[in-house]
Image (cartoon, rainbow, N blue to C red):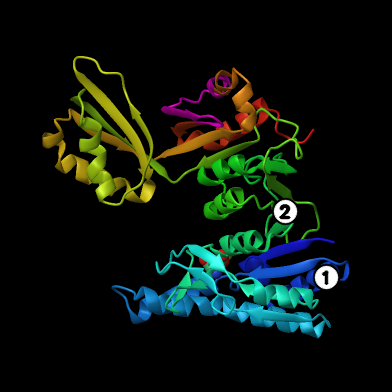
Amino acid sequence: MAFLVKKYGGTSVGTIERIQHVAGSLKEAHEAGDQIVVVVSAMSGETNRLVGLAREVQPAVVDVRELDVLLATGEQVTIALLTMALKELGVEACSYTGAQIKILTDDSHSKARIISIDTDRIMDDINAGKIVVVAGFQGVDEKGNITTLGRGGSDTSAVALGAALKCDECQIFTDVDGVYTTDPRVESRARRLERITFEEMLEMASLGSKVLQIRAVEFAGKYNVPLRVLSSFKPGEGTLITYDDEENSMEQALVSGIAFNRDEAQVTVTGVADQPGTAFAILGPISDLNIEVDMIIQNIGADETTDFTFTVHRDEYSRVIDFLQSRQKELGAASITGNDRIAKLSIVGVGMRSHAGIASRMFRSLSDSGINMRLITTSEIKISVVIDEKYLELGVRALHEEFELAAP
Ligand code: ASP
Ligand code: MG
């Protein structure tokens, strides 16, 4: 018997049949003795449909308060339908919107942060033997306005409930059956990981793995809520995400996974003065434009000048190039160039902390495949390189092989 928060995403509740299927699985777990709080997303496509409706009415600037009122309806539909489906199966259940159980957030509409959750009402139902069904993605601010947590925010709702209720595990049911060593669409021999640490998962998520929302993983790590990713269609153990402590002692792979991201573009500013203030002169205005910079590399200076390279989201590429070119004189730059056909390829693993030589294995493997690395950055548990986009798949497979990640 366990106390579980189970979250089902949009595809898992995308049709009436699927909702009934979820109700069936919940009934089984409930009969086996588990105490269950369910968090659901809107039916797949519904949030996008609602955003579209809002744009039709307000093409220029959307009123964020009203948009949240609108978007929160998506999840209100699924909590009611799932609860009905449970009752049809003879299971006692009750649905709640975010406001009803006071998922208190700040007032930043469309990207609100959860402050607290009132667990009394939920616990009363749980103690009465009911399944509690909660709308993901939404909350309420101090003044009673409906808020939403940002796209994909139901994962965060589930983890926050898991933390507030001190549940044994927060299970995220989705359309994949776990976290894989890499994307199986690129490397068919990718293997499902039984376990991964919060840290590794966080790196994987921020480096491009789309299995879990980054914020949800951060939250789970901060409050130590064990997270499990599972398929809602295929039975299995999924992947457990926890701390790497003695208790969960993981057999430590050197590298746990390979992440990649095609969304980046590289910008290079050459021949700028090698003196204090140069990086700020280039990157300050970029950040003022609200453009996020990812990797930043400055060359060693020669002849009192230096070169700067950084990466931005591919969608921002032309904006950044145009902006810097318009300021080339002011910056005293010899040239401003870039490339938006690049990809970032990364290896991630807590095992890197205690083993030397991983970087050189990575570099040798890529060079054996004839792949040129344009940029390299490292942190304690990851190494990222930027390569030409056209070699990405080749690179993923080479590294997967090099670090023996395929199924034995
Ligand atoms: N329904 C919301 C979205 O599509 C929240 C979620 O699915 O997690 O972004
Ligand atoms: Mg979703």
Disc 1 is placed on an element classified as helix
- List the residue tagged with mark 1: 30
Instruction: Name the image quarter holding residue 375.
Output: top left
Q: Nearer the viewer, residue 270 or 149?
A: 149
Q: Nearer the viewer, residue 220 or 335?
A: 220
Image location (x, y in percent) of residue 166: 69, 59
Report the amino acid beneath label 1. Answer: His
Query: In the rendered view, would you say 142 is above or below 197?
Result: below
Query: In the rendered view, would you say 95 is above or below 173?
Result: below
Image location (x, y in percent) of residue 103: 55, 71
- The alpha-carbon separation of the residues under discs 2 and 1 comes to 21 Å
Q: Nearer the viewer, residue 195 or 24?
A: 195
Residue farthest to the front, as pictured: 120
Report the amino acid beneath label 2. Answer: Asp
191 horizontally vs 78: left or right:
right
Instruction: Name the image quarter holding residue 131.
Output: bottom right
Q: Residue at x 24, y 42 (%)?
A: 284
Q: Quadrant of the C terminus?
A: top right
Q: Quadrant of the N terminus?
A: bottom right
Query: In the rendered view, would you say 67 is above or below 359?
Result: below
The disc label shown at residue 145, or none: none
Image location (x, y in percent) of residue 189: 71, 39
The disc label shown at residue 177, or none: 2
For label 1, count other residues whose C-alpha is less than 10 Å away and answer few (under 14), some (14-19) or many (20+).
Answer: some
Whether residues under marks 2 and 1 lie with C-beta atoms below 8 angstroms apart, the answer is no
Number of numbered markers: 2
- Over which residues does the magenta segment extend? 363-383
Disc 1 C-beta below 8 A from ligand 1: no
Disc 2 is placed on an element classified as loop
Q: Residue at x 51, y 70 (%)?
A: 104
Q: Residue at x 18, y 40 (%)?
A: 325
